[in-house]
Amino acid sequence: MCTKMEKYTLIITEKPDAAQRIASALNEKGKVERKENNGVPYYVAKRDKEIVVVPALGHLYTVAEERKGRNYYPVFNFRWVPRYAAERGANQIRTWIETISKLAKDADMFVDACDYDIEGSVIGYCILKYACGNKESVSKRMKYSTLTKEELEKSYAELRPHLDFALIEAGGTRHEVDWLYGVNLSRALTISARNWSGKYATLSTGRVQGPTLKFLVSREKSIRSFVPTPYWEIKAEVEINGSVFEAEYEKQKIEIKTEADTILNACKRKNGQVEKIDVKRFKQNPPVPFDLGTLQSEAYGFFGYTPRRTSFIAQRLYLEALISYPRTSSQKLPPEINYEAILNKLSKVPKYKKLAKELLSKPELKPIEGKKKDPAHPAIYPTGKLPERDLDDSEKKVLDLVVRRFMAVFSEPATKQSMKVCINVNEHHFYLRGRQTLKEGWLRFYRPYVRLEEVLLPPIEEGQTIKVKEVISEDKFTKPPPRYNPSSLLKKMEETEIGTKATRANIIQTLHDRKYVREERMVVTNLGFDVMEVLEKYCPPVVSIKLTSELEERMDKIQAKREKRENVLVDAVEILKPVVQELKEKEKIIGEQLSNAIKRARLEERIIGTCPVCGTGKLMILYSRKTGKRFIGCTNYFKGKCETSFPLPQKGSVRPLGRNCRGCGWPTVQVRIKGKRPWTLCFNPDCPLKKERRKRIEMRNMR
Amino acid sequence: MKCVICGREAGEKGYCELHAKAYESIDKKYDEWKKALEISWKEYLSEIVKNPLTGEWAKEVAEHLIKSGEKQGVTQG
C-alpha cells in the first residue's frame, strides 16, 4: 500500500489498462509507480498532489436475492452485493474490493474515471458507495472518449463536479429489471426440468434473451416449413462489337412454364434492335462514421468477425489509445476531436500518407454524419497514435477499417453512371444494364472495403441491330428466407430496440451457450423450440417484443429524468408476478416437456451424421455396456439392420463436426485432448485422404 | 394424440403445431405448382421431396403424405 500518510486523490477506472494510461497521462514528476496489493495493481502518479489510480475488473457488485439459495422462486427482494457473494468463481473480486477499500481510507478526493456510459457509471457508483464508504456524493467525474494523454489531461483539468446520477439510476434499474426477469424465469425453467427428471441442466431466458430467441424461432419455422415454387428467368446472350453480354427479359419472373416456352420460341433465331437507351448519372455519398453497430456489421461482412469479437477487438484498440470509445451509438464527429490533428498524425503512417495529405489540403474539413446520436461519446474514430506493440492480425484489420472509414467521411461523393439499354427482339423486350464509376471520390479512401460492381458496355446507339446469340430459359425456385447470422440478428435487435449496444452481442452468445441455437448461420435446436414453446404457452408477456421495447423506452426515460426507477420496477414486478405464478402451477407439465427436450438435445449432440454404409441409420457416439468405452455405431444396429461401428479415442472430448470429410464425404468428428491441438477424424478406412497421407509417409521413410 | 411424424403433442389434423404449419404451406403452394407445371398432387409431392430448398418439416410431411397416399386437403382427423 502507499507508504506515505499524506492524503491523495483516488481515481477509479473500469479496467487495469485504463488505470495505467490515466496514471501515465497525469504524471508530471518522475516515473509512474506501479504497486500491488495481494495481486491487485494500482498506480501512483505525481502532480501538485499525489494521485492513486486503481482499476476495477468491470462490475465488482451485482444484484442478488436477499435470501440465500438458488433453488427457489419467485424472488422479488434483492440488494446489491459484491460479486464474490453471489457468483461462483468470483473470489478474485474479494481482494480487489479489499484493496480499493484500503486505498480509499487515505484519500481525500475521489474521481470516477470509469467509461462514460451506462455500465461504466454503475461500476464507478457501486465502488464509490460500497467499497469506498459512501463517497458517491462527493466524487467527481472524468469524461473522455479516448485514452490519449491530451484528452486525459484535459478531462482531469475539467473534472465534472459530480457523478451523472440519472445515468446511474437508469443503469441500476436496467440491472435490477433484468435480474428480476432472468432469475425468476430461468429458475422456473431449470427447477421444473430438474424436479421432473432429477437431473440438473441450466436453462435460461431473460427480458431480452426471450424475444431474441423468438426472432430466431419464427425465422426457423418459416425455413423448415418452406415449400419452394418454380419460376423461369429468360435471358438473351447478345453480341456487340465482338463481346458477349447477358440481357435480362422485361419480366423478371415467369410463373408459368408454357408462357416461358412461348417467349423462348418467339425470340429464337431472331435479331434485336436497340429501342431506347437510358443513361443516369447519380452521386453516391460517403458512408457515415462508425457507431458500434455499423462497425460490427462491416467487420462481419469483410472479415467474418462476430459482433462479440469485433467488440472485444475494438475495446483493446481503445485501451491502447488507438481509437475512441467504441461502445457508442453516435454517428457524429464533432469538430472538438480536432480532425486536422488526427489527419496530421495519420499522414505519418506510410500507407495513409497520400490520402491524409489530400484531405489536409482541402479548404475545409467537414465530415458527413449519420442520424444516430449518443449524449456521452462521438462516433468511433482513430486517434492517429501509433501502436506501442505489434498488433495481431485482427487488431490491424479493425484499426485499418476505422482509419479508412474516418478518412472516407471527409471525402467527396462518388459519381456513378448507370445505363439501361432496351433491346426489342420480336416485340419482346430485353434489358442490358451497365454500371460505371465516373469519379471515385470517397471510394478511393475506403478501399479495399468497397464493393464495386462495374459493368462496362461498348458504345451503342438507338436503332442499332443487335445479334442475339442465344435465348435461354432458366429453371428457378423461390428461396426460403435466410437464417440470421450474428450480424443480421444484432441489426434486428437494434431495429426493434431491444437490449443495449453493450449487451446485445453477449445475449447472442448466451443463446449458443445454452444450446438453443447452433452454427454461425443460426439454426434453432429442438431445445430452443421447446423452450420457446413453453414461454409462448405459459408466459407470452415475457417474449413479447413490444413489451420489451416499451420497457427499454421507459428505462431510457429514467436517464432523461422523465421516469422514476420505482415506477419501472413496480411495473416490471406486476408483469412478472402472474407469469411466475402460472409457471409454478404448471411446473409438472413444463418440467416434463423440458426434460424430454433436454434428453432429445443430449441425444442429438451424439449424432454424427447419416451412416454411409446402410444410408438410412445414423452414426452415433455410443458407450459399451461391458467396458464403458465409447465407440461409433449405427442406430440401425438395434433393428438388426446394420453392424457398422468404429473405435474412438478414449481420452479427451469428441464432438460431431456437422460437416463431411472433404476426401470421401463421410461424417466427421473433432477430438480435443488437453494440451494438444484439436483434430478432425474421418472414420472411413478407405478415405482417399488417408491413403494419400500414408503414401506421403512411406515416400518420406524410403528417402 | 401424438404427431404422426415426430411424436409431439398433436392437434386436430394429426400433426403437431410445427408439422401442421408445414402441411399448410404444402397445401397452399400446390395451386402455384399446378398452375406453373400442370402436375398432379402426387407428382407435386415427389417434386418437393427432391427439392433441396424444401424445408425439413415440409419434406417430412410430404414424405408422410406420399407414404399414406393421402389426397390434397385430406388429413388425419
Image (cartoon, rainbow, N blue to C red):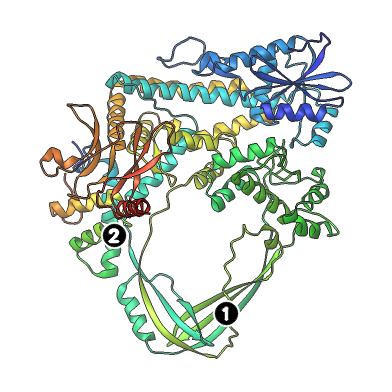
Q: Chain of mark 1?
A: A
Left or right: where A326 falls relative to A337: left
- Quadrant containing the C terminus of chain A is bottom left
On the question of residue A326 being in view, the answer is: no
Q: The disc labelled 1 sits on which kind of residue? A: Leu
Observer-nearest residue: A103 or A289?
A: A103
Judged from this view, the residue extending furthest toward the front is A703
Q: Which mark is residue A80?
A: none
Exactly how many numbered labels are in the figure?
Answer: 2
Q: Position of residue A327 (x, y in %)?
A: 64, 37
Crowding at dot 1, Cα within 10 Å, few <14 / some 14-19 / many 20+, comes out as some
Tell me the element at label 1.
loop
Q: Which mark is residue B51?
A: 2
Check whether the beta carbons of the residues at disc 2 and disc 1 lie within 8 A of each other. no
Residue drawn 76% across and 53% down?
A367
- Residue A600 in which image quadrant: top left
Q: Chain of mark 2?
A: B
Observer-nearest residue: A208 or A660?
A: A660
- Residue A672 in which image quadrant: top left
- Quadrant containing the N terminus of chain A is top right
Q: The disc labelled 2 sits on which kind of residue? A: Asn
Mark 1 = which residue?
A457
Residue drawn 56% across and 73% down?
A455
**Figure check: A517 above or below A3:** below
Crowding at dot 2, Cα within 10 Å, few <14 / some 14-19 / many 20+, comes out as few
Q: Position of residue A211 (x, y in %)?
A: 46, 36
Residue drawn 42% across and 16% down?
A73
- Residue A116 in which image quadrant: top right
Tell me the element at label 2.
loop
